Each structure stands twice: as C-alpha cells, then as structure tokens.
Image: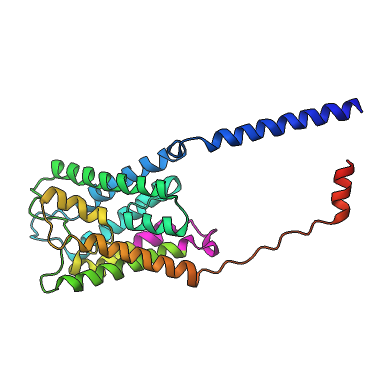
Amino acid sequence: MAVDTHLESAADEMIVKENKTNVSKGFRPWWTDNWRGILSEFVSTFLLLFLGCMGCIPIDGFPKNPPLYGALGFGLIVLINIQTFGHISGAFMNPAVTLSAVIWGNLSVAVGLAYFVVQCLGAVVGFGALMLMSPIDLSGGVCTTQPHINHNIYQAFGIEILLTASLVLINCNLWDPVNAEKVESNPVKLGLTVAGLSVAGGPLTGASMNPARSFAPAIWTNTWNGHWIYWLGPIIGAVLPTLFYKYVWLKIEKVKLPEVLPWTENNNSEA
C-alpha cells in the first residue's frame, strides 16, 4: 500500500507539472514561436525581388529580354526559395497566398499580418538592393507590372484575378490532406506554375499575382499606372478560390474513434 501511495503522489506531481507547463505556454507571446517564419518570409521575398527582377535587366545587345527569360527566371527563383524556406515558413512570399493560407486555416490572423508586413518590406528592400547593384538605371520601369497598352484597366483587372486564382488553386491542392504525403516535389510544382502563368500573363499585365512583387518596383520607380489592380485583383483571386475549394471541393473523411470497452474502464479504475 505504501508503494501504491508513493506512485500515486508521484503521478499527481507529474500531472501538476504538466498542467503548469501548459499554462505557461498559453501565456507565451505568439511571436516567440513564429519569429523564424517571419524572418524567413522577409528573406525569401527579398530574394524573390532581388533575383527575380535581376532576370528582367536587359541583356547587353538586346533592347528587351526575350519573353520567356523573365518568366522562367521568376519561376526558378520561386522553386529555389520554396526548397530553401518552405519548411520554415511555407515560403509564401506573397500577401495573396498568405491571405489564402489564413482562410484555409494554415496560419493565424496575427502571423498572417506579420507575414504581410515583412513580405512588403522584404520586397522593397530587395528591389532597392538591386537598384544599387544594377549596371543600368532601373528607374525607367524595369520589372514594373503595368497593363498592356491595348488593354483597358478592367481587362487587366480580370486577368490578374484569374492568374492569381490559378496560383491559389494549386496551393489549395497542395494543402489538401489528400496530398499531405506528397510534398517532395512541391517546389518544382509551384515553380513551374509561376513560370507557366508568367509566360501566359506576362505580356498582358506583367503577371504579378503578388501585391508585394508589384509594390516594390512601383515605390522605387514611382510607376503607379493601374497599380490598384495589382492589389485588388490578387486579393479577390485569393479569397474566392480558397473559399470554393475549402467548402466545395475539399473532402474531409470522418475518423471513427476506437470503441472503449466497459471492462477496460473497470480494470483501469480497479488498478
């Protein structure tokens, strides 16, 4: 009996310690567990603008780079960043995709807002660093996103919505529990997706699909032609497909809990 009493008191002490630990964790500021992800989003978005827009600098002897050059460049940089930072923060590099992740439930609102701020900041710093290191003056509009000269503003707006919706649907597909074990090729999938959408929409709107990507060059070059479509278009293109996928396409199978037999409960109570 003495041994049993000792074991019970030890078990009680362990339960009390565990409860205290859980309570203390509940009062930890949210950023203490997320600062690595926040820093990761800053660095990855910095590299997206710095390296991606580097591919838009005209090559010597060419007044303008071949159409596929910038599209493939951005796609491959996205591939590199997701491979490098994906396990830390998700490597969203995009306020629209971040909003989609918040709606999906992958991110809290607080972390999503922090990602949004550092993504915009990282993009601005990244393009600013490129301007300092570029062999030519980029203030003439290099790497800015603007509607095609023959498009009216609403046509460009619709294109940005559909391009972003296509990108977001791919992300929702990868977040679907059905594909939870198929993550090895995600960098390739998303990199090629961005490259493909950029090839399709680049000549028409610049294929931004990313408010931070358009905001940074606009800040540094003072180019604001139709800039609102590169915020509102991606936001709409993120919200609608995410809600549709989550509440229409997503199939959640109910897990049947194991049945607890009465004799098991009795034996546990007697022990």
> In x, y percent, where is residue 268?
85, 45
Quick check: is 175 in the magenta stretch?
A: yes
Q: Is residue 233 left or right of residue 12?
A: left
Q: Residue at x 55, y 36 (%)?
A: 25
Is 105 left or right of 227, judged from the image as shown?
A: right
Q: Quadrant of the N terminus?
A: top right
Q: Quadrant of the C terminus?
A: top right
Relative to 9, say whether 264 is above or below: below
Residue 150: x and y in percent read 11, 74
Residue visible at 9% across and 50% down? 139
Left/right placement of residue 148 relative to residue 25 reads left
- Total marks placed: 0
Q: On the image, which quarter does residue 141 sit in?
A: bottom left
Report which quarter residue 163 is drawn in. Answer: bottom left
**Is 200 a magenta residue?**
no
The answer to whether 81 is drawn above or below residue 189 in the figure is above
Residue 251: % across, % down = 55, 69
Q: Nearer the viewer, residue 133 or 234?
A: 234
Give the residues drawn in magenta, as a range.
174-193
Q: In the rendering, at what x and y percent does residue 108 appear?
A: 44, 50
Q: Residue at x 44, y 41 (%)?
A: 34
Q: Main secondary structure of the magenta part?
A: helix
Tell me where residue 56 sits by quadrant.
bottom left
Which residue is at 15% across, 60% downward?
65
